[in-house]
Image: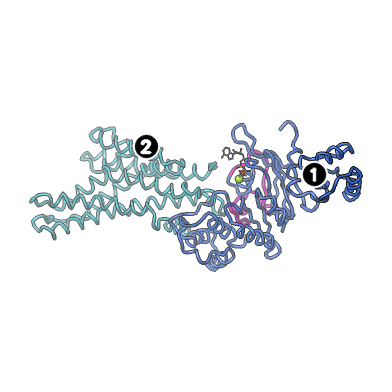
Chain colours: A cyan, B blue
């Protein structure tokens, strides 16, 4: 399995996907920095980190997953590389499993990067304008845990976007569903039913009612892993015409 | 083990209502250079994709070195190096990086990279990004990738696509020498009859998904009747005389002989008749039938129902 994973990572060199991986968390950090310097107010770390997790779970994560799966899939669709890959003396499920693993690892890395850049933004704000320096305890463990849950709750959404992106040579179906999913997640945050919408599961981890957070985590991770396995099975068994 | 490097039995593939490949029985002997010919849309690429297990046959089976592609795709794929219509190179990576991906996935030695780059004359441009490659350079890179690991069967779908005349000549020499040098079998689809004629030991001709001709090229050409090229001081009258004498005359005044005609005897006869009629004979040349003639003839072998 390791050689395939290595080749998947090699394909990211000088790619647009790599740009996205860096850009999305950077945008969150940049927004927090500008927002932190906006007025004379001093905010506790808890607010900084809460805002960061919120923006990530609410909007940036679903959009990034949509864009990332599209870009990674287009890496193969655009040069019509499937024939070469699928003709190799390697079991086909491995090829798709490696791709799925790369998506999972990359999204985890982006989530971690978002946290790190938030810390950097807070520290930088304090350096630029000491009166804006974040206050209070950092509470890093709590934030890391909550981000971890957000990530796990996003697996179902990742599986769906992953399947659409690889199944169709055009990026349009995945993009349309990703935008629609994120849109409904944003406009219907209040709705209880939203917890059953894969694109809204990550942000439901931050909900105040415990049942919502638990449902989102259980469904997002449980169904997500099943969906990912199903996606790999379907993709490796069908002919690419 | 089977005596054939590639064999298909009743191999067929439908796309909707269209039968793109129709009950193909390919027989490609070991160490042959097999030219796989046919007009656009004949089904060459579809056949090749079935040989590689990329498309499931609607019917029939394909064997590579005796291994059934439907049952043991991976075993069969280990025997094959392929250059396909779609190269699938990653433009953001260099030629060397692209080759290295394939090398890693096939679990081959690092030295393979330089070996195939040298074979295809790509050393100097190996570190350029593939997005900056010309069409011909990509084609060479595709050949380089197919050659990695010295596979026993080389399957090439129109390898001369986009090559310049020198590139075509290089490719021709390279493919022709390969079986003797490495013991490999070469299966190459092409439209370039003249190129194939120079390198192929065997040919198969596909029309509308059916194999209309297959065999050793020398045998196929030997069984062909000859033509006589003719030019005179009065071609119109020459045509009238030839027709009157019962010959089959083409538009360019070429006389098409029957399979058992003796070309030398006919040439002498025609010459005498023309001179007696007072014409000057400028040219009178018996010509062996070429692969091109065989190719045109193959179209006629199609049953009317098709
Ligand atoms: N994926 C597909 N879906 C539907 N029809 C297809 C598909 N692939 C090929 N065909 C049809 O099958 C027929 C054979 O196509 P194929 O590509 O095998 O021809 P070919 O001999 O390789 O032609 P060329 O010399 O132009 O490359 C064509 O009529 C084509 O339209
Ligand atoms: Mg073709």
Q: Is residue A215 visible?
A: no
Q: Secondary structure at mark 1?
A: loop
Residue B138 in the image, given as x and y percentages of width and height:
53, 56
| Disc 1 residue crowd, few under 14, some 14–19, many 20+, Cα 10 Å | many
Residue A192 in the image, given as x and y percentages of width and height:
26, 33
Residue B148 in the image, given as x and y percentages of width and height:
58, 61
For ligand 1, the image quadrant comes to top right
Instruction: Kindly indicate the quadrant of the structure image that contains residue A125.
Output: bottom left
Q: Chain of mark 2?
A: A
Is-magenta flag for residue A155? no
Residue at the location (72% across, 52% down)? B28
Q: How many marks?
A: 2
Q: Quadrant of the C terminus of chain B?
A: top right
Q: Is residue B152 visible?
A: yes
* Residue placed under numbered mark 2 in the picture: A176
Q: Quadrant of the N terminus of chain B?
A: bottom right
Residue segment shown in magenta: B55-83
Residue at the location (65% across, 49% down)? B190
Furthest residue toward front = B278
Which label number is shown at residue B254?
1
Q: Is residue B69 left or right of residue B90?
A: right
Whole-number angstrom distance, CA of label 1 to CA of label 2: 64 Å
Depicted A24 relative to depicted A214: above or below? below
């Amino acid at each position: 399995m390791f050689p395939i994973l290595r080749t998947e990572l090699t394909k990211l060199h000088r790619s647009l996907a790599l740009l996205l991986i860096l850009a999305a968390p950077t945008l969150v950090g940049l927004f927090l920095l500008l927002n932190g310097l906006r007025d004379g107010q001093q905010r506790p770390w808890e607010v900084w980190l809460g805002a960061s997790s919120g923006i990530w779970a609410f909007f940036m994560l679903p959009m990034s997953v949509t864009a990332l799966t599209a870009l990674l899939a287009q890496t193969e669709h655009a040069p019509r590389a499937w024939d070469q890959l699928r003709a190799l003396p390697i079991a086909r499920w491995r090829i798709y499993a490696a791709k799925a693993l790369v998506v999972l690892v990359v999204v985890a890395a982006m989530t971690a990067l978002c946290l790190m850049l938030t810390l950097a933004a807070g520290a930088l704000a304090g350096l630029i304008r000491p009166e804006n320096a974040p206050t209070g305890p950092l509470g890093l463990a709590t934030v890391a845990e909550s981000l971890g849950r957000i990530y796990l709750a996003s697996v179902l959404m990742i599986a769906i976007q992953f399947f659409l992106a690889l199944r169709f040579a055009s990026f349009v179906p995945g993009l349309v569903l990703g935008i629609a999913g994120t849109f409904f997640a944003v406009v219907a945050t209040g709705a209880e039913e939203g917890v059953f919408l894969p694109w809204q599961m990550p942000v439901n981890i931050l909900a105040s009612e415990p049942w919502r957070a638990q449902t989102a985590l259980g469904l997002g991770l449980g169904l997500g892993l099943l969906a990912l396995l199903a996606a790999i099975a379907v993709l490796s068994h069908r002919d690419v015409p | 083990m089977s005596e054939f490097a590639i064999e298909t039995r009743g191999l067929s593939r439908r796309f909707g209502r269209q039968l793109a490949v129709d009950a193909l029985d390919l027989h490609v002997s070991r160490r042959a250079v097999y030219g796989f010919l046919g007009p656009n849309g004949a089904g060459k690429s579809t056949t090749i994709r079935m040989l590689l297990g990329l498309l499931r046959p609607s019917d029939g089976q394909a064997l590579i070195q005796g291994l059934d592609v439907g049952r043991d795709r991976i075993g069969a794929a280990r025997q094959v190096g392929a250059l396909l219509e779609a190269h699938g190179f990653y433009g953001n990576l260099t030629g060397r990086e692209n080759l290295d991906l394939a090398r890693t996935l096939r679990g081959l030695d690092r030295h393979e990279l330089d070996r195939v780059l040298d074979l295809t004359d790509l050393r100097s441009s190996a570190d350029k990004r593939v997005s900056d490659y010309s069409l011909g350079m990509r084609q060479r890179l595709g050949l380089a990738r197919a050659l990695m690991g010295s596979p026993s069967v080389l399957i090439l779908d129109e390898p001369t696509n986009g090559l310049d005349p020198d590139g075509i000549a290089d490719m021709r020499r390279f493919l022709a020498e390969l079986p003797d040098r490495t013991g490999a079998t070469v299966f190459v689809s092409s439209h370039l009859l003249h190129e194939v004629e120079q390198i192929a030991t065997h040919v198969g001709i596909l029309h509308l998904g059916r194999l209309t001709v297959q065999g050793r090229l020398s045998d196929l050409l030997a069984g062909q009747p000859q033509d006589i090229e003719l030019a005179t001081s009065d071609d119109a009258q020459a045509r009238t005389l030839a027709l009157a004498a019962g010959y089959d005359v083409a538009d360019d005044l070429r006389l098409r002989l029957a399979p058992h005609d003796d070309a030398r005897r006919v040439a002498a006869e025609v010459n005498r008749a023309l001179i007696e009629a007072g014409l000057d004979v400028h040219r009178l040349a018996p010509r062996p039938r070429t692969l091109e003639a065989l190719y045109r003839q193959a179209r006629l072998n199609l049953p009317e129902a098709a």
